[in-house]
Each structure stands twice: as structure tokens, then as C-alpha cells.
Amino acid sequence: MPLPLLTPLETALDYRFAAASLLRQAVTHRSHGASHNERLEFVGDAVLNCVIAQALFERFPSLDEGALSRSRAGLVNRETLARLARQLELSRYLLLGEGELKSGGPQRVSILADALEALFGAVFLDGGFEAAKRVIVTVYGETLQDADPEQLGKDAKTRLQEWLQARRFPLPEYAVTEIRGEAHLQQFAVECRIPLLEVAACGEGNSRRTAEQLAADAAWQQLQALPKTSGLRKTPTARM
């Protein structure tokens, strides 16, 4: 891939690499070549955890260590990373081997999450901690700004279910809409529907559980984007 094609990704990150080779390595999966992103992922994971820990520590001075740890885990898990990677359209820039491309690799949760961590690691090595911190805060955006410790320790399906139950809305419906790939490399597409609220969200993963979690998270994001004046947060409108 010619390096100029990676420029839009730099724009999305709001960071310009001094060493363009680091950016290329960050988007290279091991199936594509020897100079892949696994070492950068290792560095990025450490930097990400440090940045998120600092952000939570400063924002929630009353939280104890256990609550801080659970909140951090809710922000750095693979589902969250994959969702943020999709927002960056990271799959457009990934360099994958032919087998991974045919089996849905560009949309696989693990590949997207690992590549995003590798990007964070590449920025750290290229520009230092403060540069990596700025990029991480930029990528996380509202996800970090709207962080709620009471919700972050829960998986997406539990969080969505409890939100609906508290408002007496029906529970979400999950349906597998597609299964692709060979038996050992299947990719599942799941839709999460909340008909009463006219919410429908999709998620894809290499297991039905992962796809359901991603679909639930996408539905949760839709609900949080609804105008607060809609009354959904206060007024029950349906029976359980």
C-alpha cells in the first residue's frame, strides 16, 4: 500500500507520523508479512491502559481501586476498541493476507482491536507519551467523556438490559442475520432490535456471543444519542 493512502488515517487520528514506516507496520497483520503489528500492539496496550487509568483517576476522585479497575476494563476491552476502530474506518487501511481477507478479517473484532492498540503504540514510539495521550483521547472522544463507572464494569448486553428494565421497556431481541466463512473461521452477524423504540443495531464477530455484545453496544450508543427531551430516561411507556 503506498503510504499516501494512509494520510486520511493520520487526519482521523489528528497526528502526523515522523516515521511513516511505524504507521505502515501498525496496520499490517501477521498474515501479510514479517514486519507486522504484534510488537506495537504490546506497547499500545500498555500506553492505552496508562492513559485511561490517569483519565479515570483524575475524573473520579472518589472511586476506589476496584471501581477504577473495573471502569478501565470496560473502556479498553476488545468490543470497545473494535467499535472505535470502525468509527475510524480502520478496516480500509489494514494490510492482511489473502486468507484473512477472504474470511472477513477486516471486520474481525480481534484484528480491529489489535490494530488500534498497535496504532497507539506506534504513536507513542514516534512522538512520545503526550502525543499518544492526545491521540487516545481524540479517538475515545465521547466514549471517555461520557464514561459512567456504574455502567463500565458491565458487559454490553447486561448494560443494555438493565437500562431497558429500569424504564420498563421490553428486553432486546437478538437474531443472527448471517454466518460467513469456513467452519473454523466463521464470522457471525447479529442484529439487536428494540422495536418499541425503533432501534435496530448490528454487530459482527467470530462468535455469536461477540457479535451479540457488539450489537448490544451499538444499540446502547443509539439510545444514548436520543434527545433527552424525548422522555425515555424518565417515563416508562411499555410493560415488561
Image: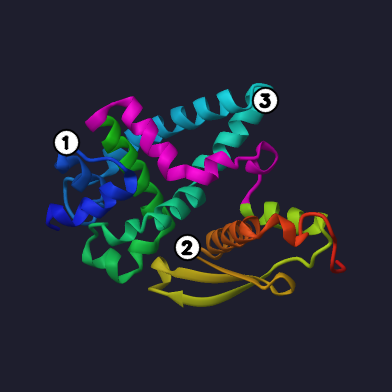
As measured in the structure, the alpha-carbon distance from the residue carrying label 2 to the one carrying label 1 is 34 Å
**Residue 79 locus on image (x, y percent):** 50, 52
- As shown in the figure, which amino acid type bears the numbered disc 3? Leu
What residue is disc 1 on?
A: 18
Task: From the viewer's side, name the closer residue of 117 and 55.
Answer: 55
What residue is disc 2 on?
A: 205
* Relative to 84, 167 lies left or right: right
Q: Quadrant of the C terminus?
A: bottom right
The local crowd at label 2, few if under 14, some if 14 to 19, many if 20 or more residues have their Cα within 10 Å, is many
What residue is disc 3 on?
A: 63
- As shown in the figure, which amino acid type bears the numbered disc 2? Gly
**Who's the residue at 82% across and 55% down the image?**
234
Q: Quadrant of the N terminus?
A: bottom left
Q: Which residues are magenta?
A: 126-155
Magenta stretch encompasses residue 125: no
**Who's the residue at 46% across and 63% down the image?**
206
Compared with residue 145, is residue 2 higher up or lower down, i.e. above or below? Answer: below
- As shown in the figure, which amino acid type bears the numbered disc 1? Ala
